[in-house]
Amino acid sequence: MAAIALRPRVVSFILKNSAYAPRLLPAPLPTLSLSHHQIRHSSHAPAPSLSRLPPGTKPVTIQTIRDLHRKKIPITMLTAHDFPSASLASAAGMDIILVGDSLAMVSLGMPDTSEVTLDDMILHARSVSRAAGPSFTVGDLPMGCYEVSPEQALQSAIRMVKEGRMQSVKLEGGVECADTIKRITTAGISVCGHVGLTPQRQHALGGFRVQGKTVSAAEKVLADARAVQDAGAFATVLECVPPEIASIITSKLSIPTIGIGAGNGCSGQVLVQMDMLGCRPRGSFLPKFVRQYGDVWERSLAAVEQYRDEVKTRSYPAEQHNYAVDSAVVETFRASVDRSGNKIP
């Protein structure tokens, strides 16, 4: 893996914080000498595997996350839904990679998260796991695979860990999901909670609405967060809650809160990667809390349009993109074909 250029201030921050220090950039992969029979026969380069960590690189674990929380170092979480997006998140040094059920909308074109299945999630989780590197991985349990009973939830969680190769699972809900979370954690599977706005239940909530805007509503979010904590969750996502309320809730918990639309007082933050990179066409809806750090759609569109134009004008492929062949071979081949009656223009 090629070394990643970091700004001096980022390097200084990493070196000053022991929780990050073991995760400095991996050493380059050794050069392989291929025999004649090992040479690949493909028009594209194989993707490098990031599943094996270079010597000296320590993976992020539950204990790492607890240490960051104890030291009040913000925890970074970002979604990934396939090998390339996981590679990017890992290379950027994300503490946690979340295979979120936002997959439904940003990758599968579904109208909301309620349609995505456990099988869909497992397929994409497995792809993410191959590139996660040292980042800790969390797989969302989608709607319909954990609500029936704690036993159903445990079976789904086991599949996410065994088949999806995730290190933990995430599920939405508070007090009503406490027994479910406890059942999963007592079986040895780590759980991240999700309280506040729970998108899987958007229709019951009347749409995507900010939670905790009244005293009673704020008390409910706190009760949900405490129930998740007491059931054994190692952290909880806190979504669409006013920052002042989120800060108070965070201060009353012993586990970290990962905010999304919940202000800067949470223990960490999470965003959907496609949103923050700007991977959607201009005019697409973005929640208020999203900061768009890139403009991938416009740059990608310009690149694809340039490719189209160069193909149409035959300026691509150019000489530097072609494979050389001896002119004598060409002439001999031409003469051979001509003799056979198949004239080459």
Image: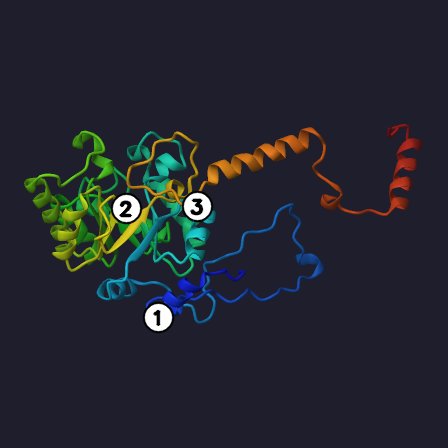
Q: Residue furthest front?
A: 9
Q: Is residue 144 above or below residue 229?
A: above
Q: Which mark is residue 295?
A: none
**In which quadrant of the rendered view does residue 173 lie?**
top left
Q: Residue at x 62, y 35 (%)?
A: 307
The residue mark sitting in front, 2 or 1, is 1
Q: Are marks 2 and 1 in contact (CB under 8 Å)?
A: no
Please provide percent x and percent y for residue 138: 32, 52
- The earlier-in-sequence mark between 2 and 1 is 1
User: For residue 31, which quarter of the picture?
Assistant: bottom right
Looking at the rendered structure, the kind of residue marked 1 is: Lys
Three-letter amino acid code at the position of disc 3: Asp
* Whether residue 58 is visible: no
Q: Is residue 84 left or right of residue 340?
A: left
Q: Residue 1 location in percent, x, y?
A: 53, 60
The spot of residue 212 in percent (x, y) is 13, 41
Residue at mark 3: 82
Residue 16 higher or lower than 246, as above or below = below
Question: In 3D space, how far apart are the residues under numbered discs 2 and 3 (Cα atoms)?
Answer: 20 Å
Q: Say what amino acid the circle numbered 2 marks.
A: Ser
